[in-house]
Amino acid sequence: MKTRIKELRAKYNFTQEQLAKKVDVRRETIVFLEKGKYNPSLKLAHDVAKALKTTIEELFIFEK
């Protein structure tokens, strides 16, 4: 799975730490999400999308 988290985080000038605090997770979780090494729960995906003012579908790119 690919994500646009890093791209959108840069757009809003958020550090990984700032985004992590907004969605109530550790910074390492954001790192793993950005690298595609962690599949988030629906709630976390929703919270990250909301914090980055986008939709889950725009944020996460699911590959076959």
Image: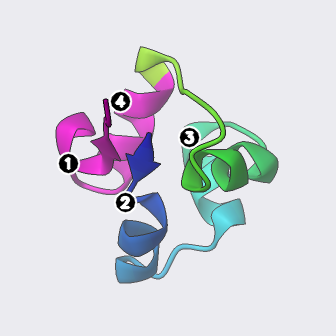
Gap between marks 4 and 1, in whole Å? 11 Å
Q: Residue at x 35, y 80 (%)?
A: 11
Q: In the rendered image of this protein, does residue 19 appear above or below residue 14? A: above
**Counting other residues with Cα less than 10 Å from the Cα at mark 4, is it few (<14), some (14-19), or many (20 or more)?**
some
Q: Earlier in the sequence, mark 1 or mark 2?
A: 2
Give the structural element (helix, strand or loop) at label 4: helix
Where is residue 15? Give x, y as percent. 62, 73
In terms of depth relative to the viewer, which is nearer, 14 or 1?
Answer: 1
Where is residue 19? Give x, y as percent. 57, 57
Gap between marks 3 and 1, in whole Å? 18 Å
Mark 4 and mark 2 residues within 8 Å of each other at the beta carbon: no
Indicate which disc residue 49 carries.
none
Q: Residue at x 35, y 30 (%)?
A: 46
Q: Is residue 45 left or right of residue 31?
A: left
Q: Earlier in the sequence, mark 4 or mark 2?
A: 2
Give the residues in magenta. 44-64
Write down the residue under mark 4: 46
Mark 1 and mark 2 residues within 8 Å of each other at the beta carbon: yes
Gap between marks 1 and 2, in whole Å? 8 Å
Gap between marks 4 and 3, in whole Å? 9 Å
Write down the residue under mark 2: 4
Mark 4 and mark 3 residues within 8 Å of each other at the beta carbon: no
Kind of residue at disc 1: Glu
Queried whether the magenta region covers residue 63, the answer comes back as: yes
Gap between marks 4 and 2, in whole Å? 14 Å
Q: Earlier in the sequence, mark 2 or mark 3?
A: 2
Kind of residue at disc 4: His
**Counting other residues with Cα less than 10 Å from the Cα at mark 3, is it few (<14), some (14-19), or many (20 or more)?**
some
Write down the residue under mark 3: 23
Write down the residue under mark 1: 58
